[in-house]
């Protein structure tokens, strides 16, 4: 929601915006026949989205036609995947701080952090709808860039029972160093 809520004052999305859906290709410079370009019919922002806290920071894009040839990721139905210590992967086209933003999809793998550690690092900023993934600064710094293209990207954990081999447990929303 935080990525698109500012397109119009009333939170609606311009009807002529396109979404580029990449099927089997993660390169923004790919030839047009390597991906599908689908018009967005409507953007639905979570009715409980709170801009000040990023609570319920999610929106759905209703496309005019269905994408084809994709294996959709499963959505986690159990909180067991959000267990501290599990490894999560976030993907996005966000900047790295070195040169221009990348043209190929990037990923970072981070541990899920215990709720009490996260809450003590960000007092009053973590709602019941959030959990944290990241490092504590004592290891090699890895993160996602919420202000340069990664926010809204999937936060996934491995699941061999899923057709996509991953389940989505959340979305990248905001970040700060611990």
Image: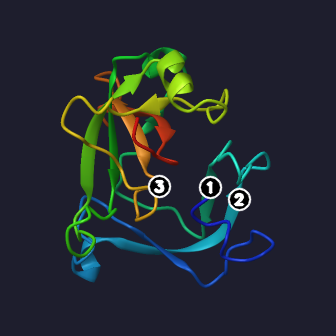
The reply to whether discs 1 and 2 touch (Cβ–Cβ < 8 Å) is: yes
How crowded is the residue under tag 1: few (<14 C-alpha within 10 Å), some, or many (20+)? few
Residue named by callout 3: 151
> In this rendering, would 64 be left or right of 27?
right
How crowded is the residue under tag 3: few (<14 C-alpha within 10 Å), some, or many (20+)? many
- Viewer-side residue, 84 vs 45: 84
Mark 2 or 3, nearer chain start: 2
> In this rendering, would 32 be left or right of 119?
left
Tell me which corner region of the image, top left, top right, bottom left or bottom right, holds residue 89: top left
* 3 or 1: mark nearer the eye: 3
Residue at image x 72%, y 50%? Answer: 46
User: Where the N terminus falls, by quadrant?
Assistant: bottom right
From this view, report whether residue 88 is shown above or below residue 72: above
The colouring scheme, among rainbow, by chain, secondary structure or one colour, is rainbow
Mark 3 or 1, nearer chain start: 1
Mark 1 or 2, nearer chain start: 2
From this view, report whether residue 114 is shown above or below residue 132: above
Q: Which mark is residue 32?
A: none
On the image, the x and y values in percent for residue 112 come to: 39, 25
Residue named by callout 2: 44
Tell me which corner region of the image, top left, top right, bottom left or bottom right, holds residue 10: bottom right
> In this rendering, would 119 be left or right of 45?
left
The reply to whether discs 2 and 3 touch (Cβ–Cβ < 8 Å) is: no
> In this rendering, would 166 be left or right of 100?
right
From this view, report whether residue 66 is shown above or below residue 52: below
- Viewer-side residue, 32 vs 109: 109
How many marks can you see? 3
For mark 1, give the secondary structure.
strand
Residue at image x 79%, y 50%? Answer: 47
Residue named by callout 1: 60
């Amino acid at each position: 929601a935080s990525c698109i809520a500012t397109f119009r004052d009333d939170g609606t999305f311009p009807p002529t915006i396109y979404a580029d859906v990449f099927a089997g290709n993660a390169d923004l410079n790919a030839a047009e026949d390597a991906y599908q370009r689908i018009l967005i019919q409507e953007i639905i922002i979570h009715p409980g989205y709170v801009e000040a806290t990023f609570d319920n920071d999610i929106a759905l894009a209703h496309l005019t036609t269905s994408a084809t040839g994709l294996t959709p990721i499963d959505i986690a139905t159990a909180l067991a995947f959000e267990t501290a210590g599990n490894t999560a992967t976030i993907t996005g086209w966000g900047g790295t701080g070195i040169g221009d933003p990348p043209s190929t999809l990037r990923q970072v793998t981070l541990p899920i952090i215990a709720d009490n550690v996260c809450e003590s690092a960000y007092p009053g900023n973590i709602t019941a709808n959030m959990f944290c993934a990241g490092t504590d600064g004592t290891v090699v710094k890895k993160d996602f860039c919420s202000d340069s293209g990664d926010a809204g990207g999937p936060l996934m954990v491995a699941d061999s029972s899923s057709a996509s081999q991953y389940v989505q447990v959340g979305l990248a929303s905001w970040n700060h160093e611990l």
